Amino acid sequence: MSKIGASIIRGFEEAIAFAEGTADMSLYRVHIPAEIDVRAIRGRLGLTQQQFAVRFGFSVNTLRHWEQGRRVPEGPTRAYLMVIDREPKAVEKALRIA
């Protein structure tokens, strides 16, 4: 088996263990920032509030509250926003209706 093939299989096995809850969580580290600039993310993508909300599954009102500082995204939502910021095409592809 090639190194690439072995790496893919190892990654698949790790993903299964993670999904089943049997993975050694001490091996995984994530950093989710305490604050995230939603307006800046939206601006980098060149989208209006309406477009951003529809594309990524947020309500426009929630988006406005975040951008105006009246509310802040919770941990999992901040993580999702980070993924949108770094890999917007992957998120769009994942959310696309088959």
Image: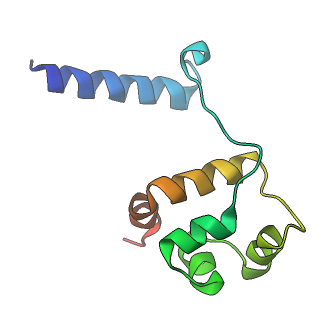
What percent of the width, then of the height, locates residue 3?
14, 19
The residue lying furthest to the right in this view is: 70
Count of picture labels: 0
Q: Position of residue 53 (x, y in %)?
A: 63, 77
Residue 25 placement (x, y as % from top left):
60, 18
Tell which of 46 and 71 is nearer to you: 46
Residue furthest left as drawn? 1
Q: Position of residue 11 (x, y in %)?
A: 34, 26
- Please name the residue shown 68% across and 64% down the image: 38
Left or right of 59, for residue 80:
left
Q: Quadrant of the N terminus?
A: top left
Left or right position of 10 against 22: left
Q: On screen, 44 above or below 48?
A: above
Residue displayed at 54% across by 15% down: 27
69 relative to 72, above or below: below
Closer to the camera in the image, 37 or 91: 37
* Placement of 26 over or under 96, stated as above or below: above
| Rendering quarter of residue 63 | bottom right
Residue at left 31%, top 21%? 10
Q: Is residue 63 left or right of residue 40?
A: right
What colouring method underlies this structural image?
rainbow
Quadrant housing the C terminus: bottom left
Q: Is residue 28 above or below residue 71?
A: above
Q: Residue at x 67, y 40 (%)?
A: 32
